[in-house]
Image: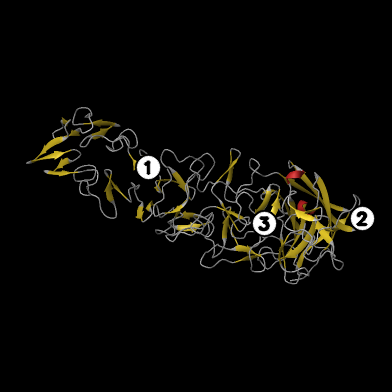
Amino acid sequence: MKRVLLVLALAVAVGGCGNNELTLKYRLVGITPADVVRVETRVDVDASDPRAFYVDQPYRQVATGVGYEVRDFEASGKKTLLVTHDATLGFVFADTFEFRLLPPVNGAAPPLSIVARAVGVSDMIGQTTPIAGKFAKNAKLTIDLADQRCGAMSCDANDLCCAGACAAVQSDAVNCGACGKSCAPTGDSCSGATCRCAGGSACASGSNCCGGIGCVDLKSDPFHCGACDKACSPGESCVAGACKCGSGGACTGPTAVCCADGSCSLSGTCTCGGTVCNFPDICCGGTCVDARSSNAHCGACNRACSAPLACANGACACNGVICASGDTCCGSGCVNTSDDPNNCGACGKQCRAGEVCGAGQCLCGATACGPGELCCGATCVKQSVTNCGSCGHVCKSGEQCNAGGTAGAVASACSCNGNSPCVGNQLCCAPSSPGGAGCFDPSSDPKHCGDCATVCPSGQGCVTGHCTPTPCSPPCTNGNTCNGGNCRCNGSGDCKGSDTCCGDGCHDLSSDPKNCNMCGHACGNGEFCCKGVCTKPSNENCTGCGAACSNGNCCACPNRTPSCTGLCVCL
C-alpha cells in the first residue's frame, strides 16, 4: 500500500492564499451552537486511491480548541485522520466555521472521503454520510450538520424514534419491532423485537394474554371466565365467557360448588359414589379431587399434566405459567426457542445486544456476528475505539479498546495504557508524554495543557488549554480554579482525587449516575454509571456495576429493583 501524509492548517480568512487546498465549510443546521461540545471530522483517503495515512500522530492542538490525531480507530489496519473542534478547550462554535486541509508536498493530491459529526454533552447530535472531497485551487466543501436527535435525545443504535421519543423496539411492548406495534392483547412483553406472553410466545388468535399467567381463552376457561383471574365455582363450565352449572346459571356463594349431576350446592358438599366431596373438591370417577392442583385432573376430570408441566390454578403450567402451543418449558419459564434471544435454539442460550433469534440462531440482520463483534443497527461491526463494548461508545483520545474475551463475549472496554478509562474532558497520554502517562484534562492540567505534549513553565497554570501565569502553587487541577491563591470549586473547597469540579460541586464522573463521564450527564432511569459509561442492568451488572448473576438471569422490570431470579415476569 502506498503512503501519504496530509499537512493541516487552520483557515484564517475567507479567500485564503488560493493555493491547492480544500477548505471545509461547516454549517450547523437546526442546531444551537451552545448545544455542541465537540465536532469530530474523520478524513480518509478515498477507497478508489491505493494510498493511505501511515504514521500515528498523537492528539495535537493547532489552534484554540482545534486539534487533530492520526491512528487506526476501527482496528481495521487502516489509519484515519481525526480533526476535532472542542468547546471544552476554548473553541467557540458559531452557525458556520471553517478548517483548511493542505495536500502532501510531493505527489498528486489524493481524493478524500469525509464524515463529520456534532456531539453534545454525551450524545451524538448529528452526523453526515461520507462526502467526497478533492484538492484544487480555492476548493471548498460544505459540510451540513443537521440535528438528528429524537426529542432532543440521541437514540441508541438499535432504537427507533417513535412519536418524538427513543423507543427500544427490541424490548418495548408498546413499540415491539416497529413504532406503534403494541403487544396487547396477545402479549404482555417484548424481547428480540417479538411480542411474548409471560415470557413465552404471543397468544394465538382467540386467546388473551393474562399478565404473568399466560395465554387463556376467556370464553371457555373456567378459571379465567370473561376476564383474567375471574374463576367460576368448582365444577362449573365457562360458556361464551359466562359461568354455568349444568344447563343453568352460575352457582352463588363463597363455598358454592357445581355437583356432577349439574346441581348447585351452596354448602359446598356433593355426593361422589360412596363418599361426599367438600369444597373446593369435585368428583372425578368416584374420587374427590382438587382440580386446581391435581396433575391427573387439572381444571377438569381426566385432563392430565405431563412433566415438566404441573397443574397450577387449573392449568398445566411451566413454573406457574401457561405456555403457548409449541413453547418449551425451561428453568426460566415458557420460551419459544426459535425466536427468543434469551433462549435461542436451547434453554439459556443468549444472543448479544441488538441481535434477534431467527429459527433458533442468533442473527444481526440476516447474518451471524463473529466472536467479539457487536450488532449495531442490524450490521455486525468489529469492536474498536469508535464502538467499544457497545454500539457508538467512543473511547477518549489516546485510549485503546481492550478485547473482553472470546466465543462471542462483548465485554470490551476503553482503557488508557491498560488502566481504567478516562472520564469527562480527559484524554489519554502515552508513557512517552513529557508530563507523564495517564488520564488528564487538557483544559486545566499544567503538565498536559491543550495536548499531551505541552508542559506549562513553572508558575503557570492551564486555562482552557493555554498556559497562563497563576498565583496558585501547585497549579490547580480537577477542574478547580485559582481564587486568591487557593484552588477552589465554585468558590468553596477544592475537588481532590478522582473527583471533578462540576457546576454543583465535586463528583466522581466514573461512578456518579447523575454526572456520568461528563458533568450534568445523567444516566437513564435504572441505569448504573460503570467506569464512566451509563449501563443498563444485565447479567454482568444486575444490581450494580460488576454485580453479576451466577444463575445467568437478571430480572430488570421497569420501575422495579433488578434482581437475580430464575423466573422473570414483568407485570
Q: Is residue 231 left or right of residue 181?
A: left
Q: Amino acid at mark 2?
A: Gly
Is residue 51 in sight in this rendering? no
Q: Is residue 430 above or below residue 342?
A: below
Q: Earlier in the sequence, mark 1 or mark 2?
A: 2
Q: Is residue 117 left or right of residue 203?
A: right
Residue that label 2 marks: 18
Dot in front, 2 or 3: 3
Mark 2 Cα-neighbour bin, 10 Å: few <14, some 14–19, many ≥20 = few
Dot in front, 3 or 1: 3
Q: Is residue 353 above or below residue 234?
A: below
Q: Is residue 369 above or below residue 229?
A: below
Q: Is residue 256 left or right of residue 558?
A: left
In x, y percent, where is residue 294? Answer: 22, 47
Q: How many marks?
A: 3
Q: Residue furthest right?
A: 17
What is the CA distance from the residue labelled 2 to the residue labelled 3? Answer: 49 Å
Tell which of 16 and 490 is nearer to you. 490
Mark 1 Cα-neighbour bin, 10 Å: few <14, some 14–19, many ≥20 = some
Q: Earlier in the sequence, mark 2 or mark 3?
A: 2
Where residue 463 is drawn, which disc sits there?
none
On-image quarter of the C terminus = top left
Q: Is residue 512 above or below residue 203?
A: below
In x, y percent, where is residue 229? Answer: 33, 37
Residue that label 3 marks: 499
Residue at the spot 59% in from the left edge and 37% down from the top edge? 163
Residue that label 1 marks: 204
